[in-house]
Image (tube, grey):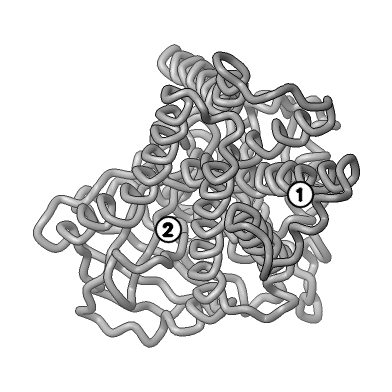
């Protein structure tokens, strides 16, 4: 109990330190530019627009760090939270960058001549290229599904556009050079640029090199109910890694680890296997997942992990697992691990599915109930005739019917479709369950 409390306190301190560090990286260069030698005084709105542009550029560069998968960064929050933060901060950065020229054009209309790409100086052309890259990046990210862009294609395009936006933004800043008259100011931005390049090198070169030395071999491809396939992978020439139930990894099947696109999937096997093997149970939902059943036994693959803070280990008298659809995968890892550990605490699994035949791991859940105090409650949207169980969707009422108070003493895990997760989080707040007692995982990295 004490160790868990110390760990949570450490994660809180580390999280606060990273928030402060982020603000320093964004704001310190901005304030540094205002010291020392500066150009002739300009009106407030011109200076304000420049400040917005510098801050937006600094935020754009730091976006590479939020998705660099540094475990000591992701541990306090979980990778899904950081990717959500990445998306929100991207919108803020784009807004700042767009506000920069808009304000300038409003207070100095003569600058509209710079929109003539053919006759404009190169520093203005770089600004236009940076802005265009940002707008295309934003549009393809927000409307990828509507535009029917494949995930792999979008990921490649996303990386190229992000690098182009930052590089051309830096070239625009250097070309203008109004605040870069002092050598130490130029050195500051050179150092920031080197730092950003270092992040890219770490993600695209250093980590893939480590992965290349530690491949896995597919030893089993197992069809499951619910249009799901389980891949069992064993380490090839190394000991593998230890994971905590509920965590996930990035899987690369076709191509080398130097490829841009990896796919995140939860580990579904017990964390107590002891042989370094990992299993991922993948439902057919998209282009990549639709081909998982075609992967041959013996194929060499690469797994980057473990990641995620959606894990057991906190003080609790009962575990309440709430899963919908593919959200059952991390729950199975938790159930299997607790059974292998002979944990005697009760476990309630509320499992939403379409119909009786599509319930993934249905038979195994019945079998595990003999080794664990597990109560599985199936909630079906299309139940068979004569069904006397729960119907429709997992709601607060379903939760109250099958979970006994005191609610604040239990530990809750929620994973599934966003509407279900939103409803469950709201229900737990109504039941006065502390936020430290419930955990949610939203697998949306695009």
**What residue is drawn where x is 62% and y is 51%?**
442
- Quadrant where the C terminus lies? bottom right
Q: Which mark is residue 268?
A: 2
Q: First in sequence: mark 2 or mark 1?
A: 1
* Mark 2: few/some/many CA within 10 Å (<14, 14-19, 20+): many
Between the C-alphas of marks 2 and 1, the distance is 44 Å
Front position among marks 2 and 1 = 1
Furthest residue in direction bottom, as rendered: 294
- Please tell me which residue lies in front, 211 or 423: 211
Q: Is residue 15 left or right of residue 120?
A: left
Residue 397 spot, x, y in % from top left? 86, 47
Residue 217 spot, x, y in % from top left? 21, 70
Label 2: state its secondary structure: loop
- Please tell me which residue lies in front, 90 or 101: 101
**What residue is drawn where x is 52% and y is 76%?**
153
Q: Quadrant of residue 134?
A: bottom right
In the picture shown, does residue 45 fall above or below 206?
above
The residue indicated by pointer 1 is: 98
Q: Is residue 439 left or right of residue 309?
A: right
Q: Is residue 15 visible?
A: no
Residue 247 spot, x, y in % from top left? 44, 47
* Mark 1: few/some/many CA within 10 Å (<14, 14-19, 20+): some
In the picture shown, does residue 410 fall above or below 265?
above
**What residue is drawn where x is 35% and y is 68%?**
259
In the picture shown, does residue 253 fall above or below 263?
below
Q: What number of labels is visible?
A: 2
Label 1: state its secondary structure: helix
Q: Which mark is residue 138?
A: none
Q: Quadrant of residue 127?
A: bottom right
**What residue is drawn where x is 79% and y is 44%?**
99
Q: Is residue 325 visible?
A: yes
Residue 231 spot, x, y in % from top left? 35, 71
């Amino acid at each position: 109990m004490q160790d868990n409390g110390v760990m949570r306190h450490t994660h809180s301190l580390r999280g606060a330190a990273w928030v402060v560090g982020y603000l320093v990286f964004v704001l310190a260069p901005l304030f540094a530019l205002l010291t020392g030698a500066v150009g002739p005084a300009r009106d407030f709105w011109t200076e304000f627009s420049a400040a917005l542009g510098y801050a937006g550029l600094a935020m754009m560069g730091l976006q590479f760090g939020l998705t660099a998968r540094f475990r000591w960064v992701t541990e306090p929050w979980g990778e899904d939270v950081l990717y959500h933060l990445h998306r929100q901060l991207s919108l803020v950065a784009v807004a700042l960058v767009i506000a920069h020229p808009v304000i300038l054009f409003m207070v100095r209309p003569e600058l509209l001549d710079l929109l003539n790409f053919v006759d404009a100086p190169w520093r203005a052309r770089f600004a236009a290229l940076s802005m265009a890259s940002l707008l295309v990046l934003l549009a393809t990210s927000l409307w990828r599904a509507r535009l029917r862009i494949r995930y792999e294609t979008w990921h490649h395009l996303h990386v190229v556009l992000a690098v182009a936006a930052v590089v051309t933004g830096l070239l625009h800043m250097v070309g203008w050079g109004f605040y870069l008259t002092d050598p130490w100011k130029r050195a500051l931005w050179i150092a920031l640029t080197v730092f950003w390049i270092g992040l890219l090198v770490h993600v695209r070169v250093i980590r893939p090199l480590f992965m290349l030395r530690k491949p896995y071999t597919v030893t089993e491809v197992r069809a499951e109910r619910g249009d799901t396939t389980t891949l069992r992978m064993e380490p090839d020439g190394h000991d593998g890694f230890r994971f905590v139930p509920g965590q996930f990894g990035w899987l690369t099947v076709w191509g080398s680890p130097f490829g841009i696109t990896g796919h995140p999937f939860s580990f579904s096997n017990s964390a107590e296997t002891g042989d370094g093997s990992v299993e991922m149970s993948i439902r057919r939902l998209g282009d990549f997942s639709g081909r998982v059943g075609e992967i041959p036994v013996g194929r060499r693959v690469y797994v980057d992990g473990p990641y995620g803070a959606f894990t057991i280990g906190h003080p609790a008298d009962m575990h309440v697992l709430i899963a919908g659809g593919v959200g059952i995968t991390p729950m199975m890892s938790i159930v299997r691990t607790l059974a292998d550990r002979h944990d005697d605490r009760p476990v309630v699994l509320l499992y939403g599915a379409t119909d009786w035949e599509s319930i993934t791991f249905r038979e195994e859940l019945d079998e595990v109930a003999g080794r664990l105090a597990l109560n599985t409650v199936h909630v079906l949207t299309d139940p068979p005739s004569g069904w006397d169980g729960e119907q429709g969707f997992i709601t607060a009422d379903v939760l109250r019917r099958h979970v006994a108070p005191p609610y604040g003493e239990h530990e809750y895990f929620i994973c599934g479709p966003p509407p279900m997760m939103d409803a469950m989080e709201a229900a737990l707040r109504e039941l006065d369950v502390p936020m430290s007692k419930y955990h949610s995982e939203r697998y949306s990295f695009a």
